[in-house]
Image (cartoon, rainbow, N blue to C red):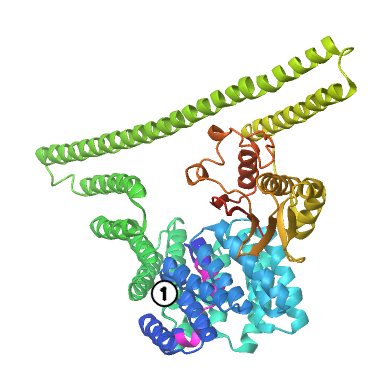
Amino acid sequence: MFYTFKRIIFIIFIIQFSVNSFAQMSKKQRLDSLKLELKKSLHDTTKVYILNKLSNKYAVIKSDSGIFYAKKGLELAKTIKWKKGIALSSQHLGASYAIKANYPFALKYYTQALAIYNQLNDKTKIAGIINDLGLFNVEQHKEKKGIEYLKKAVTINKSLNNNKGLSKNYVNIGLAYSYLKDYKKSETYYNKSLKIKEKLKDNYGIVLVLLNEAADQIELNKLCEASELCLKAKVICEQENMVYNSAFCYSYLGEIFFKKAKAASSVKINCKNFYKNNKQNFYKAKEYTLKSLSLFKKVKDLSSISYSYKMLSEQEEFLENYKLALVYFKKNTKYKDSVFSKDSNIKIANIQLQNEINLRKKELKEHDLVVHKKQDQMYVLIAFLVLGLVLVSFYVYYHSRKQKMEHQLNRILATKNLDLERANATKDKFFSIISHDLRSPFNALIGLSDLLVTNFDNYKKDKTKKIVQSIHNLSVETHKLLENLLEWSRLQRKTIKPNFEIVNLNKVTEDTNSMLKNAADSKKVLLQNKIDADINAFCDLQMTKTVIRNLISNAIKFTSKGTVEIRALKKESFVEIQISDTGIGIPKNKINTLFTINNNASTPGTNNEKGTGLGLVICKELVEIQGGEIWAKSEEDKGSTFVFTIPIKS
């Protein structure tokens, strides 16, 4: 119970409940009031605040709704480009995901909020986020790391003279040391927090610190000290109408008196008054537990209701009231079933069944003298029938689970077979390129070189130069094809990994245009770099250069006496790069097959230039490996535009 309560304190500190609204209104009234306020609000910034308040209120009672309202706030804040609102919504999203134990998403949104608060130099908010990150680590049992964060928050809050923030930091550090069972340090930090909260008259915070201290005292078996702390907290809760925390005060007191009674019962003292007084401890334990149960029902905390019934069952069992113990145990199980998932319910049902059988055995012991042999046989028969039903249930459950797993395996195998068929088709195409596209230039090279060797003395200088030039051109084309084949092969084997860095796209394009200027000038093509000088991307420099070079080369290849323009547009999380030409265009029936190896046949350029047929395939692989996309738009006789995207930041 004590660790469970500390978990609840963790949630409360993250979402920072408003004490006044908690005391004065019901949950439904507060939520309805905020929703009405949201409808009436005329300002977007106010709406962002209200959406985050709704997220705050829903966080514990319905975490999915907490996430929903925080996301709405984040969307609106991004639409109006309000940094503070984006940070606030991200912080609430982090808190809601932390409560739901979705730690990767919680860390993501906390980190986003912290980055923006750092930009805004809002030290109070920075300290708040660092505090939340400390608690976030404590919740994941990374107490030492959590303490590091919390002590950083202490340093910031001290510099700001922020006593409210300091009181939270101290109690959270105490909580972390408590989890580490270093109770001396936890008490030191609890006392620091308590002094500040008493000065601030923060009664809600005082109660939380007192109950945390009480939990430690119970762990140390200092039951009198724990009892005093709980009673002090109870008085404040009743004064401030803190229903939820009052429930925990009574629950703790129930456990303390039950623990006292059990400890005293273990001592053998032959004294009627001693046993009479000790029995009073049991009755007090039961009285407090029943009171906590009624309050937990009031706030509809199913988990705590279930636990209260469990405690009552244990108390009645200790007093040997087995029938009443069984009644409470069944109620405990009923509420537990409402909390746990379907898979857990099967295990819990079996445990419940076993406990029911054990309790019935105890009942049988009480009635051994009055229950005859036939009744004994009947109970045994019932037990066997129940066990038989359990075995049948197990068989049905595991049989259905086995069938489900077989279906999943069949789906996986079908997918793998499809992937294998595609891989084989790609491999066949690859070998066909090697056998056809490499054989042709090599045959031409052999023929030309043979011709030159045979007639070298007979040919004139001009004739020899033409043949040598042809050999050179063929060698260059073949070398390009080999390079593309090797590059494509490495991409298929996943041996290339991008090295991400900040890259200036204007400079990359300028360098590429300089490299391709001679080729463009020879065809009277004007290269125009229209990318703004301040546009950067987060990408692999060499891969991005290769893509831009290939696409500009293609544009020059299919353009004569025209223009090639390179533009870049900033989107929300990526840059869109466009390379447009005024060339001959592409037929509609070829657009969808441009980037596949099955369409590797190269089309001659406007000056009958040859290509490898793999350039666009490699471009697609290099863009996708960086997390982007590539596509083309074209109209015959008017030109083409090739577009690809790359991330704008990490």
Figure label count: 1
Q: Can you say whether 467 is above or below 642 in the image? A: above
Q: Look at the image and tell me whether residue 359 can be seen.
A: yes
- The foreground one among 484 and 154 is 484
Q: Residue 513: horizontal and vertical position, in percent?
A: 78, 52
Q: Residue at x 36, y 49 (%)?
A: 344
* Range drawn in magenta: 7-21
Q: Look at the image and tell me whether residue 253 can be seen.
A: no
Q: Residue at x 62, y 33 (%)?
A: 492
Q: Please tell me in which quadrant of the rendered image residue 377 appears.
A: top left
Q: Please tell me in which quadrant of the rendered image residue 388 appears.
A: top left
Q: Secondary structure at mark 1?
A: helix
Give the class, few, some or many, for how many residues have Cα within 10 Å of label 1's Cα (few <14, many ≥20).
many
Q: Quadrant of the C terminus?
A: bottom right
Q: Describe residue 232's horizontal placement relative to residue 301 as left or right.
A: right
Tag 1 residue: 247
Q: Residue 421: horizontal and vertical position, in percent?
A: 47, 27
